[in-house]
Image: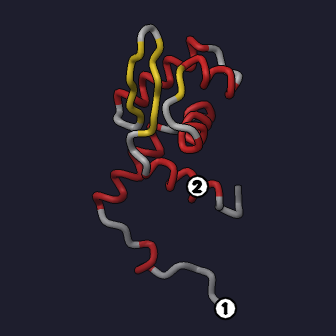
C-alpha cells in the first residue's frame, strides 16, 4: 500500500493556499490555538472567562483576542463593561483539528 500522496492530492488552489496560510499565521501561538479550541466548544465567553479557563493573564489575553478580532478570526459583543468573544471564521477549527491529527506531532 502506497501512503505517499499523489501530486493531484497535494494540489490546492491559490485561494485555498492563501486562506490556510492566513489561518496558520494568525493562530501561530499556543495561546491563540487554545483560544480557538475553547471558543469552538463554548461560544460567547468573556475575557475573564477565557482567562480563568486558560490560566492566562487578562492583559496578555486581550492582546491576542484583539489581534484575532482585527484579522477576522473572532467577533465580539459588548455587554456593559464586558466583552464576549466568539469564533467568526469557523474554518480555523478545521485547520487546527487537521494539524492535531498529524501523526508526526
When the figure is inspected, residue 29 is found, relative to residue 21, above or below; the finding is above
Q: Position of residue 43 (x, y in %)?
A: 51, 37
Crowd rating for badge 2 (residues with CA inside 10 Å; few <14, some 14–19, many 20+): few
Q: Tag on residue 28?
A: none
Q: Residue at x 43, y 30 (%)?
A: 68
Residue at point 58%, 55% (across, down)? 97
Q: Looking at the image, which residue is at 61% across and 31% down? A: 31
**Location of mark 2 (residue):** 97
Q: Secondary structure at mark 2?
A: helix
x 45%, y 40%: residue = 25
Q: Residue furthest top?
A: 81
Disc sitting over residue 1 in the figure: 1
Horizontal side of residue 8 vs 97, given as left or right: left
| 57 up-or-down from 84: above or below | above
User: Circle 1: is it few (<14), some (14-19), or many (20+) Cα within 10 Å?
Assistant: few
**Quadrant assignment for the N terminus:** bottom right
**CB under 8 Å between discs 1 and 2:** no
Nearer-the-camera pick, 58 or 3:
58
- Label 1 vs 2, first from the N-terminus: 1
State the separation of the CA atoms marked 1 and 2. 26 Å
Q: What secondary structure is found at the residue carrying circle 1? A: loop
Give the camera-side residue of 14 and 30: 30
Residue 71 rendering spot, x and y as whole percentages: 35, 33
Indicate the quadrant where residue 70 lies: top left
Left or right: residue 59 versus residue 103 is left
User: In front here: 13 or 50?
Assistant: 50
Q: Where residue 76 sits: x, y (%)? A: 39, 26
Amino acid at each position: 500500500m502506497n501512503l505517499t500522496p499523489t501530486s493531484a492530492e497535494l494540489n490546492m488552489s491559490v485561494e485555498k493556499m492563501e486562506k490556510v496560510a492566513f489561518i496558520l499565521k494568525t493562530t501561530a501561538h499556543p495561546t491563540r490555538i487554545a483560544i480557538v479550541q475553547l471558543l469552538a466548544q463554548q461560544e460567547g465567553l468573556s475575557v475573564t472567562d477565557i482567562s480563568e479557563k486558560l490560566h492566562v493573564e487578562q492583559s496578555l489575553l486581550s492582546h491576542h483576542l484583539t489581534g484575532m478580532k482585527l484579522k477576522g478570526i473572532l467577533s465580539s459583543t459588548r455587554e456593559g463593561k464586558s466583552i464576549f468573544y466568539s469564533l467568526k471564521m469557523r474554518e480555523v477549527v478545521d485547520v487546527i483539528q487537521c494539524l492535531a491529527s498529524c501523526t508526526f506531532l
